[in-house]
Amino acid sequence: MRAVRLHEHGGPEVLRYDEVPIPEPGPGEVLVRVHAIGVNPPDRYLRDGLTTMPGDPESTVGLPVIPGTDVSGVVEAVTADVHGLAPGDEVFGLLRFPSFNGSAYAEYVAAPASDLARKPAGIDHVHAAGAPMAGLTAWQFLIEVGHDLPSPFQEARHRPTALGADTTVLVNGAAGGVGHFAVQLAKWRGARVVAVASGTHETFLRELGADRFIGTRSRPEELVHDVDVVLDTVGGPHSARFLHTLKRGGAHFPVFPGNFDEEETTKLDVTVSSAQVRSNGAQLAELGGLLDTGTVRVAIDSTFRLADARTAHERAARGHIRGKIVLTTV
């Protein structure tokens, strides 16, 4: 089969389109003929040289390595201990995350059956491949964590805030992969949504259900108050400014943990909490139901052939992404 591999770390130019053996599925795994692959930030982190996931004591990455975690495709074969999936089934999934062992940038992948869900019949493989990591991140931050495993970012277990008609959610980076799912999931739960993104995305986000739009050139902390939840998909050193949009008792959820002053959060009477997204086929099946009915949709920024993974990573580096970047094999 053909696969994209890293033989060294560096920029997009180190992505090589190689010929490699088709993997053999192990216990609890199925062999998937991949139709499409979602491009995610951890793919780029691995390419740049990050080989240890937060919370892991040591790296399990050896070069050459096939990056990637998000796939949509068709089951080619199943091992004897796998039940509920059969050759010919269309599936999608986030593979072996958190780890760098997804090996998704390939024409075939050996995938844990527990990481997979049936692909929604109402969407194609390209849109399905854009959903797993971004969709599950938004789901586990806002709807249900789905596991009791400790987070490397904090001692306390992340607990989503109950959302409903009496809650307001602010999503920063609302047009991106996680952000555009978060907007839709919050609306699905009945919340009022304030979307913060580049001004070019206003129409797009209002179509997804955003009740209010604020451009990134504005100062949301001066324009918005009494928010129940902030989901900041951008994070970084400026994330703390969103604390001032929250009401007392509100919660700030940074997808990329930043530095927060404990005295300030105590004074404001707000909570800062983060989580580490994990593969979860059952949750993905729930999300798949929403995708199938059109309640939630996947926005595709751009698609590239697997052989053009370098160009896809160059597109990602330019930023201002609307939805997801996806690679295709067929």
Image (cartoon, rainbow, N blue to C red):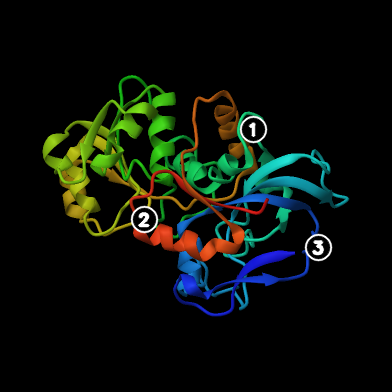
Residue matched to label 1? 120
Q: Secondary structure at mark 1?
A: loop
Q: Secondary structure at mark 2?
A: loop
Residue matched to label 2? 256
Residue type, numbered disc 1: Pro
- Using the numbered discs, state the Cα–Cα distance from disc 2 to disc 1 in whole angstroms: 29 Å
Q: Quadrant of residue 218?
A: top left
Residue 176 image position (x, y, % from top left): 38, 45
- Using the numbered discs, state the Cα–Cα distance from disc 3 to disc 1 in whole angstroms: 26 Å
Residue matched to label 3? 24
Residue 33 visible somewhere in the drawing: yes
Instruction: Decide which of 32, 287 is in the foreground and name it.
Output: 32
Residue 68 image position (x, y, % from top left): 58, 60
Placement of the N terminus among the 4 image quadrants? bottom right
Within 10 Å of disc 2 (Cα), the crowding (few <14, some 14-19, many 20+) is some
Residue 209 visible somewhere in the drawing: no
Which of marks 1 and 3 precedes in the sequence? Answer: 3
8 left or right, relative to 240: right
Instruction: Decide which of 290, 251 is in the foreground and name it.
Output: 290
